[in-house]
Amino acid sequence: MSALHPTLLRQLRRFGLQEDTPPSDPDTWVRLLQQIDGHYTHMESDRAMLNHSLEVSTEEMLDRQESARREQEQLTGLLQAVVDALEVFQGALRSPEDATLDRWSDTTAISQAQRNLSLTIASVLSELDGTTAGDTAPVRALRAGFNTFSERLIDLLSQASRHAALLQTVEDARAVQLRLLPSEEPALQTLGLRVAGWSEATDRCGGDWWYTRALSPSRALAIIGDVTGHGAGAALLAAAARGATTALCEAQGEHLRLGTLMDHLNRLTCEGGGRALMMSCCALLIDQERRELRIVNAGHPFPLLARQGKVHTILGVNSPFGVDPDHSYAVGRAPFERGDAILLYTDGITEAENAIGEAFGEKRLRRTIAEHGFDSPVAVRDHLLQSLRRFAGEHLSDDATCVVLLSAE
């Protein structure tokens, strides 16, 4: 007989039986069998309870795994919305020189990012509130943290939207200002004048401007101005001055008086600049029939005149616009012979600095017009720009403008 299981042996000993000793009477056998049956009945019950517990634990584990997966997807979506919003925010604040900007698209993208982020956060937190996990301390802390973060990020996106709209306004102002500048070579050929100019703003838009216009078959106006400062305020005042000059030329034509024009621009600067902005300006009224020019200089760099291989300075001193609205501007006169060349410029050229802080200066400017002043105006301008770029690099620290006029022989 093989060895019995220890559990069965314990039951036999309770009845005074040994492994190899059978029961002495039938009642003992009955009680023994009942005891064994009860034992296996309890074992079956315990096994069923164990299986049920395992099934419940497995289902609960699977439910929790599914819940964790959903929460992970929700949080991943939330983080992706945050990343998308930050990318839009970064794009809206990028430097204007980095790319060609579409500020309308930027503003629309920022608004869309705000909506997406708000909706995503509201959806995720709402779903978390409906779960058991939503009542845990970590989730409550996460909810509070994301609420605070989202409020701050949405505020940043609002600021970025306003910033993008402002940059769009500045871009529009720059486009208008560029359109207001004269074309490459204004049509003054019938007066025997050839003209070329160039202007560059250090910001997106600036305060430099210039304008030329034929007033009669023998008379022409050339004017250059420089509003103090940079940016939209200076650009608006420059555009107003240019517009006022155009209007006065159209209204008075060949009867335009140079002093009247300058007095008008001075009052406009005093009113529009509010004493916060001033403008230097130099205007020439060229009379080809009389071979002379009239000049008013309102605190502007003196024009340079190239004649017979020499360079002369055309002096003329008046206060800049914006100081005294009642100031009356005196008009000077100078001969203007055939073959003469005049250079008008702003101080952004002479004050341009190289890497060691040395200014370009009037000496280099005079040398340029002395060497090329009897070429075409375009050639003079281009040689000047090449010299300036070689000296100061591509980006200037101030608005810079030059206008070259040549009286054909």
Image (cartoon, rainbow, N blue to C red):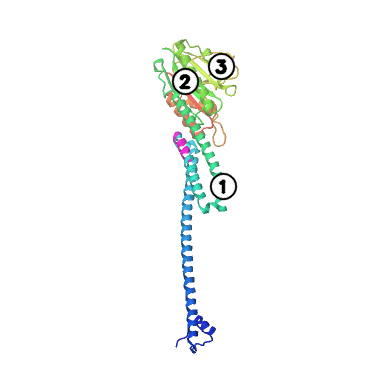
SS type, badge 2: strand
Q: Nearer the viewer, residue 106 or 318?
A: 106
Q: Badge 1: few (under 14), some or many (20 or more) residues near its Cα, within 10 Å?
A: few
Please, what is the three-letter code of the amino acid marked with disc 1?
Ala
Give the residue displayed 48% in from the left and 82% down from the top. 30
Please, what is the three-letter code of the amino acid marked with disc 2?
Tyr
Q: Badge 2: few (under 14), some or many (20 or more) residues near its Cα, within 10 Å?
A: many
Q: Toward which corner of the image does residue 109 lie, by quadrant?
A: top left
Q: Is residue 409 visible?
A: no
Identify the magenta region. Answer: 104-113
Q: Which residue is mark 2?
A: 211
Q: Toward which corner of the image does residue 263 lie, by quadrant?
A: top right
Lower position in the chain sequence, tag 2 or tag 1? 1
Q: Are marks 2 and 1 in contact (CB under 8 Å)?
A: no
Q: Nearer the viewer, residue 256 or 104?
A: 104
Q: Is residue 115 above or below residue 1?
A: above
Disc nearest the viewer among 2 and 3: 3
SS type, badge 1: helix
Lower position in the chain sequence, tag 2 or tag 3? 2
Q: Position of residue 10 (x, y in %)?
A: 53, 82
Residue 111 lies in the magenta stretch: yes
Q: Which residue is mark 3?
A: 267
Q: In the rendered image, which quarter contains the N terminus?
A: bottom left
Query: Whole-Å distance between the Cαs marked 1 and 3?
Result: 59 Å
Q: Is residue 58 above or below residue 109?
A: below
SS type, badge 3: helix
Give the residue displayed 53% in from the left and 43% down from the top. 150
Q: Position of residue 308 (x, y in %)?
A: 47, 19
Q: Nearer the viewer, residue 390 or 312?
A: 390
Disc nearest the viewer among 2 and 1: 1
Disc nearest the viewer among 1 and 3: 1
Q: Which residue is mark 1?
A: 144
